[in-house]
Amino acid sequence: MTTVALLSVAPVIEGSMAGEVAKAVDALDEFDVSYETNPMGTVIEADDAETVFAAAAAAHEAVDGDRVSTVLKIDDKRAADTTAERKVAAVEEELGREAKRER
């Protein structure tokens, strides 16, 4: 996979957004992507940017509301294959430790 993206889709509402965010994440299953949701968004991996754009658009459309906020950040590495996991591993190699800390 060569395209890694961070997607955040949320309705602009008071209270919990979990139900609407779940709809956005569920919409990703219609596309040839892998993904992992974290507290700040969902990391998506695909073979190309076009697939990421289509998946992000579907996630955006899946959310109900008068106002929906979507942020998409894409790393489209065209010269070599990579994964989100490898990107984190490279940082951890430089750190000499896991890139995580519990409080």
Image: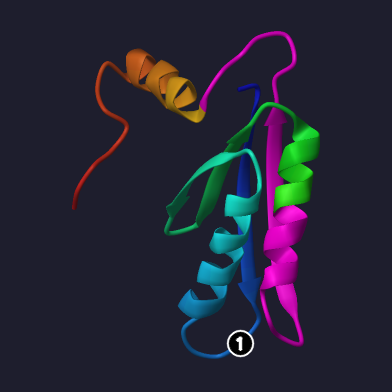
Image quadrant occupied by the N terminus:
top right
Residue 30's place in the image compared with 87, above or below, is: below
Q: Secondary structure at mark 1?
A: loop
Residue 72's place in the image compared with 67, above or below, is: above
Inspect the magenta stretch and tell me whether residue 64 lies in it: yes
Residue 53, position in %: x, y?
78, 45
In the image, 7 versus 61, the foreground residue is 61
Residue 93's place in the image compared with 87, above or below, is: above
State the residue at coordinates (62%, 60%). Answer: 27
Q: In the displayed structure, does residue 6 sit left or right of residue 57?
A: left
Residue 29's place in the image compared with 74, above or below, is: below
State the residue at coordinates (49%, 57%). Answer: 40
Residue 58, position in %: x, y?
73, 59
What residue is disc 1 on? 13
Q: How is the image coloured?
A: rainbow
In which quadrant of the rendered view does residue 82 lie? Answer: top right
Residue 2, position in %: x, y?
65, 22
Q: Amino acid at mark 1?
A: Ile
Q: In the displayed structure, does residue 21 sit left or right of residue 70?
A: left
Query: Which residues are drawn in magenta?
Result: 56-83
State the residue at coordinates (74%, 28%). Answer: 48
